[in-house]
Image (tube, rainbow, N blue to C red):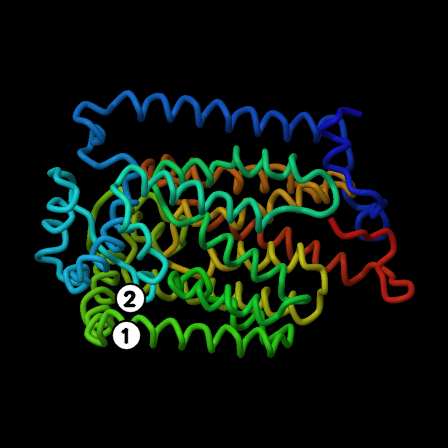
Amino acid sequence: MSWFGKALLPAGNSNRGFGAQRHLDLGSDTLFCLFLLAACLLYSLHASFNYLTTFTDGILDFAGRPIGRDFVNYWTGGVAVIDGAVSRLFDFNSYHSYQEYILGLDFADHSWSYPPHMLLILWPLGSFSYLPALALWSAATLFAYLWACRLRNGDPWVVALALLLAPSSYICLAGGQNGFLTAALLIGGFRLMRTHPIIAGVLFGILTVKPQLGILLPFALMASRRWLTIVSAGVTTVFMVAASAFLFGLESWEAYFEIIVPFQAVIMNERQGEFLVMMPSAYMGLRLLGVEQEIRTAVQLLLFVIALAGVVWTFARCQDWILQLAVLTVGTFIASPYAFNYDMTAISFALVLITMRALRSGFLPFERIILAMVWLLPISINWLNLHNLPVGSVMLMACFCCLLLRVHGELATPKVGGAQLGKKQI
């Protein structure tokens, strides 16, 4: 057995009962995982080289966007707080001109889409010039992500390597996005629920800066009776909203609901641009196929109900935190119509954990290819959507079904003394 295979295998043997129906071929499975990681590394190197060689005008790329792309929005938010110009973030007529003024360059149009309490996080970035702020943001959020995903058992370096090579990590870094931050908040809060429920609630409360990524979280917490975490998350959210209203003015929240929220609806239904092909949701996939809005809404609502039912069932019946996290993260992307490939960093961690377990106990039928497709989805979704193959939600649903089968297997496994036979947490 290779070192990589040993590193991925926790102690214990769970290849019993439901697991006995799975196929276990450690040698080929390990090689398959190594192949995927090597392919991801080559893709990242190739894409980075192609991207960095397109800069013809200082820090602007071929499309006239600053390096770090969307990070310019976060930096603008921080600078606006220090300048006392928060109102310009919510004014479409002056926002981009303000960005060009503070950066000192003419560049492609951007828009602000975050609630005012996001500024409590971005505020410190305004103390730095653009490039140092970008470096600080990338390093700090990546560190927080890897710290939240660290494992006490097994080999944490294998997990860190897999996450660094994950397609979602490349997309997040290249786009200067917040996927590492939101994943750190979700995963960190999730792993602290049992031992530090109040701190977990604080992290979940902060996650409300991207509410679409927590669309199923309240239901999961209620199903698992995490009442203290729920209260802590609610108090944290109220505090952040109140603090932002006090610091930036109540009018910032009025502008958010009157201008930004309706504009996001326009984006989902009318606007054109690269962002369209970056969404794996069923709603956006159907829009790309020209399906009417009423049908898109109905399909998305149906998928929300399915994802909600799966999450509630899992959290109410299963105590395995790895399966809970996997079901929640994948279910969130099925349920939410507004989520991007750079937000899939939390899913990547869940896939690593499920793969580590499958290397020990065996894969379900077709599970290898399904996990691999979802792992690669952050970089494949653009190509698929551009070629009228918006099957991202289909892949996510297939993965969701595999996870629910695993939950069923966990519940069906005989227990002795309150512990499942052959199970040991990673």
Of the pair 419 and 99, the residue shown nearer to us? 99
For image coordinates 31% across by 57% down, the residue present is: 123
Q: Depth check: 336 or 288 in front?
A: 336
Q: Residue at x 56, y 24 (%)?
A: 38
- Residue 348, x across and y down, in percent: 54, 44
Residue 278 image point, x, y percent? 35, 44
- The correct choice, above or below, for 6 with respect to 332 in the image is above
Q: Callout 1: helix, strand or loop? A: helix
> How many neighbours does mark 1 have within 10 angstroms: few (below 14), some (14-19), or many (20 or more)?
some
Which amino acid, mark 2? Pro
Vertical order, 424 against 386 (above or below) = below
The answer, for residue 279, to whether it is visible in the render is yes
Please give left or right for residue 221 compared with residue 390 in the image.
right
- Residue bearing the label numbered 1: 245
Which label belongs to residue 116?
2
Q: Is residue 132 left or right of residue 11?
A: left
Residue at the far front in the pictured view: 127
Quick check: 370 above or below 161?
Answer: below
The quadrant where residue 192 appears? bottom right
Gap in Å between the C-alphas at discs 2 and 1?
Answer: 8 Å
- Of residues 347 and 284, the one drawn nearer to the viewer in this rendering: 347
The answer to whether marks 2 and 1 mark residues whose Cβ atoms lie closer than 8 Å is: yes
Q: Amino acid at mark 1?
A: Ala
Query: Picture coordinates of residue 229 (x, y %)?
Result: 57, 73
Residue 163 at x, y = what percent?
Answer: 55, 39
